[in-house]
Amino acid sequence: MLGGVSNQDVFARTRTFKTNLTKADVGKAVAMVGNNEVGLGTDGATFAGKLVRVEKDGVGTVECFGNVKVPYSGAMVLGKTVVVDGAGKVKDAGTAVNGRGFASVVDTSATTVEIEL
């Protein structure tokens, strides 16, 4: 993908962001880490979506809307909002006000959760 990254006037399931992540990070939960930039974030940061693609030029595609399936850590409860854990997974937001989406399907054997965004 060449050129700048901009999401003005865009509403789609995925969006593009700058990133320092690699192809090894595809499938992980990400957070905003800078202006129009995603990364793994810090523990408790707002969940932005699931990284689905990384280009050579430092642009990543993130699923930000709809039903997103990502790995989770800790105890996950249906209907709860989530935040990132800083290691590529989501976790129950608890009492944090920056939780996003809600858990609609929890697969304890695969430790994945589907989040409705």
Image (cartoon, helix red, strand yellow):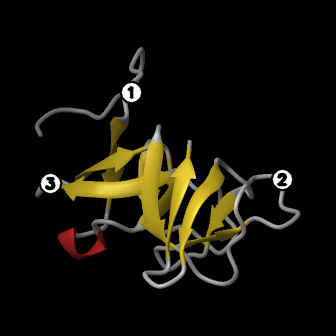
| SS at mark 2 in the image | loop
Please give the residue where the numbered disc 3 appears in the rendered image.
55
Amino acid carrying mark 3 in the image: Glu
Amino acid carrying mark 2 in the image: Val
Instruction: Check if mark 2's residue and mark 1's residue have beta carbons within 8 Å.
Output: no
**Is 38 situated above or below 4?**
below
Please give the residue where the numbered disc 2 appears in the rendered image.
97
Q: Residue at x 38, y 46 (%)?
A: 63
Q: Which mark is residue 7?
A: 1
Amino acid carrying mark 1 in the image: Asn
Disc 3 crowd, CA 10 A, few/some/many (<14, 14-19, 20+):
some
Residue 7 horizontal/vertical position (percent): 38, 27
Q: Is residue 7 visible?
A: yes
- In this rendering, would 73 be left or right of 114? right
The residues tagged by marks 3 and 2 sit, at their Cα atoms, a distance apart of: 33 Å
Disc 1 crowd, CA 10 A, few/some/many (<14, 14-19, 20+):
few
Nearer the viewer's eye, disc 3 or disc 2?
2
Q: Is residue 39 visible?
A: no
Q: Which mark is residue 34?
A: none
- In this rendering, would 87 be left or right of 43? left
The residues tagged by marks 1 and 3 sit, at their Cα atoms, a distance apart of: 17 Å
Quarter where residue 41 is shown: bottom right
- In this rendering, would 110 be left or right of 103? left
